[in-house]
Image (spheres, rainbow, N blue to C red):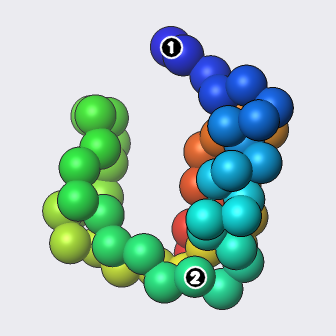
Amino acid sequence: MLFANRAQVERLRLRYPIGTRVELVEMDDAQAPPIGTQGTVTGVDDTGSLLVD
């Protein structure tokens, strides 16, 4: 698994500030929510993953 470096994480935090609405288009995970699931960004962790509620 590849993780984002600090600069990439900071760019993600600028692009997806808390409160941004997002929709799942693709996710390579056996337990992924259905495509089209929508949510609100609650943060970006240190690995570059979007935290969505």
CA neighbours of label 1 inside 10 A, class few (<14), some (14 to 19), many (20+): few
Residue 7, position as x, y percentages in the image: 77, 35
From the image, which quarter does the C terminus lie in? bottom right
Quarter where residue 33 is shown: bottom left
Q: Residue at x 30, y 63 (%)?
A: 24
Residue underneath mark 1: 1
Q: Is residue 26 left or right of residue 3?
A: left
Residue underneath mark 2: 20
In the image, residue 35 sits, relative to residue 10, either above or below, namely below
Nearer to us of marks 2 and 1 is 2
Mark 1 lies on a secondary structure that is loop
Looking at numbered disc 2 in the image, what kind of residue is underneath it?
Answer: Thr
Mark 2 lies on a secondary structure that is loop
How far separated are the C-alphas under marks 2 and 1?
26 Å
Q: Is residue 31 left or right of residue 39?
A: left
Residue 29, position as x, y percentages in the image: 32, 35
Q: Residue at x 33, y 73 (%)?
A: 23
Q: Residue at x 71, y 64 (%)?
A: 14
Out of 48 and 31, give the one closest to the viewer: 48
Asked if residue 45 can be seen in this view, the reply is no
In the image, residue 38 sits, relative to residue 6, either above or below, namely below
Residue 31, position as x, y percentages in the image: 32, 42
Q: Is residue 15 left or right of residue 42?
A: left
Q: Residue at x 72, y 77 (%)?
A: 18
| Residue occupying the far top of the picture | 1
